[in-house]
Image (cartoon, grey):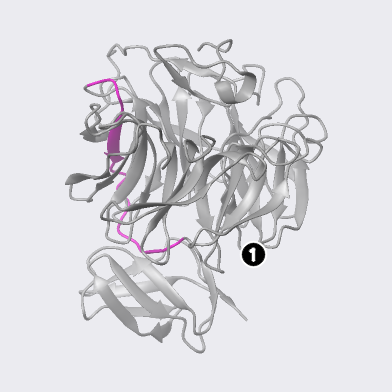
């Protein structure tokens, strides 16, 4: 890693030829991987990226048509990134692979989400009218609309993945810009009306490098990579109206967890979980942490190198109750997939060896039970892969977007597998009417008498449970 060659957006320099951006303050040298004798039988490579279909893929997400969708940082026909989709059965398609060479519609796309209106939404770190990033809408047929071009004073370099709130607006963060220049939290309507909710001032955090999540208490939570009481970053919460609170200051002490650069995840136990790429122990190899609703912080696990280092995020809690994630590197390979219990017992599930990918991104669990993800590098062309991992876990249903709460009468979107016209839905045992849109997507209405608990879909004699409880709001 070349830590001296920093990005133009931070200190006026750029990553050198043959490098790409890694964390906010580092570039990654693009090395060719050498296959070792390690086994990689558990991972199935679904796609090898090869310039024409993109390179350096980013986070993936499952859409309501069953596709695993995502973006690539680079390559494609005009070298500004692509958007792609992969049907679970294996058919790959490029959703969009074109942009103006001057990047008015964005450059370096980050993660995607599918909105309740069926369109895909995301941000680009660069590009836009002012070349400091954009928010865009993308139809599933590839029609792109730029909703916002950031200009600096209202934020610059938006990061991570957007989150859709109950109000139908999208919430996110920018790494830089705003009045003090330390980044912002924003919301944007589907029509492109931007509101800056908060401007970081270093004292209360600086330079968020991930978006926000919506927790069950109705607040949004996020992290900053710097700033705060000790300069080691913060965990914060913010309301949809911009009321901001620092809930934890990373102490910045040497070897302690600090500098989070990934989004949080809320477990079914209501605790928040996250990762840091450095610190955590004397090895300084990164850590996984937990924060309770009462604000009690603990290091859940510290990496030592042999089990990986520089963990990414966000983690995902699968239907086995464990959190699944990745490390960017390991002393025995080119990164790992791991799972960890809420109590802190970690198991390395897979070690990448280059031929099957390297420098893995965060993973998701598809509704077929498998783990899906991408790698920035490695594969047949050393430009990244899209992969699956069979966990042995069964089919389930989930909510789209991942809103697991609502009032009686609310319309809820559910994604899964094998839906038919005869599929039925229940909320913790209370039946509800299902409107089946496709074999992977249906809508329903929270029925009178519904109570908090699992949502089930019964189809063809098989009952599929939701991956988390649905909370009925009074």
State yes or no: residue 425 in magenta: no
Main SS category, magenta section: loop
- The picture places residue 409, in percent across and down from the top left corner, at 49, 84
- The picture places residue 50, in percent across and down from the top left corner, at 23, 27
| Quadrant housing residue 337 | top left
Give the side of residue 344 with respect to residue 237, left or right.
left
* Relative to 223, residue 221 above or below: below
Q: Nearer the viewer, residue 309 or 77?
A: 77
Give the side of residue 133 with respect to residue 103, left or right.
right
Residue ID at (40%, 15%): 332
**SS for dot 1:** loop
- Report which residue position mark 1 lands on: 218
- The picture places residue 206, in percent across and down from the top left corner, at 71, 35
| Quadrant housing residue 232 | top right
Q: Nearer the viewer, residue 91 or 308?
A: 91
- The picture places residue 158, in percent across and down from the top left corner, at 55, 41
Residue 351 appears in the picture as rendered: no
Query: In the picture, which quadrant includes the C terminus?
Result: bottom right
Q: Residues within 10 Å of mark 1 (few under 14, many from 20)?
A: some
Residue 472 appears in the picture as rendered: yes
Residue ID at (29%, 36%): 386
- Bounds of the magenta segment: 381-401
Q: Residue furthest bottom?
A: 448
């Amino acid at each position: 890693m070349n830590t001296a060659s920093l990005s133009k957006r931070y200190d006026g320099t750029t990553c050198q030829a043959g490098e790409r951006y890694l964390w906010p303050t580092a570039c990654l040298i693009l090395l060719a991987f050498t296959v070792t004798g390690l086994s990689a039988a558990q991972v199935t490579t679904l796609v090898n990226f090869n310039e024409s279909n993109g390179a350096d893929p980013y986070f993936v997400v499952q859409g309501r048509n069953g596709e695993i969708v995502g973006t690539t940082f680079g390559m494609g026909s005009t070298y500004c990134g692509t958007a792609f989709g992969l049907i679970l059965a294996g058919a790959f398609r490029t959703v969009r692979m074109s942009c103006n060479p001057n990047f008015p519609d964005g450059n370096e796309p980050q993660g995607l989400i599918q909105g309740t209106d069926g369109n895909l939404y995301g941000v680009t770190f660069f590009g836009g009218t002012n070349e400091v990033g954009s928010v865009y809408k993308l139809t599933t047929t590839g029609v792109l609309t730029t909703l916002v071009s950031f200009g600096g004073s209202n934020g610059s370099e938006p990061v991570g993945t957007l989150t859709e709130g109950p109000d139908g607006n999208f919430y996110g963060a920018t790494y830089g810009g705003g009045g003090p220049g330390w980044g912002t939290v924003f919301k944007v309507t589907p029509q492109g009306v931007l509101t800056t909710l908060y401007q970081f001032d270093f004292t209360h955090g600086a330079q968020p490098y991930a978006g926000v999540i919506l927790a069950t208490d109705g607040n949004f939570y996020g992290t900053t990579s710097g700033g705060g009481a000790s300069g080691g970053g913060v965990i914060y919460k913010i309301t949809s109206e911009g009321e901001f609170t620092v809930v934890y200051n990373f102490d910045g002490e040497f070897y302690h967890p600090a500098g989070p650069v990934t989004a949080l995840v809320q477990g079914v136990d209501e605790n928040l979980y996250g990762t840091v790429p450095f610190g955590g122990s004397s090895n300084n190899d990164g850590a996984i942490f937990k924060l309770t609703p009462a604000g009690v912080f603990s290091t859940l696990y510290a990496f030592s190198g042999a089990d990986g280092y520089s963990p990414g995020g966000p983690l995902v809690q699968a239907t086995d109750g464990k959190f699944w994630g990745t490390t960017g590197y390991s002393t025995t390979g080119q990164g790992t997939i791991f799972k960890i219990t809420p109590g802190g017992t970690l198991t390395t599930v897979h070690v990448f060896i280059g031929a099957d990918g390297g420098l893995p991104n965060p993973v998701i669990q598809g509704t077929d039970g498998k783990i899906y993800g991408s790698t920035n590098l490695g594969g047949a062309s050393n430009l990244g892969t899209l992969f699956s991992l069979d966990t042995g876990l069964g089919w389930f249903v989930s909510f789209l977007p991942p809103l697991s709460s609502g009032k009686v009468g609310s319309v809820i979107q559910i994604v899964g597998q094998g839906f038919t016209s005869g599929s039925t839905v229940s909320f913790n045992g209370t039946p509800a009417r299902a409107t089946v849109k496709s074999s992977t997507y249906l809508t329903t209405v929270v029925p009178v008498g519904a109570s908090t608990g699992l949502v089930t879909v019964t189809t063809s004699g098989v009952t599929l449970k939701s991956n988390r409880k649905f909370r009925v709001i009074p």
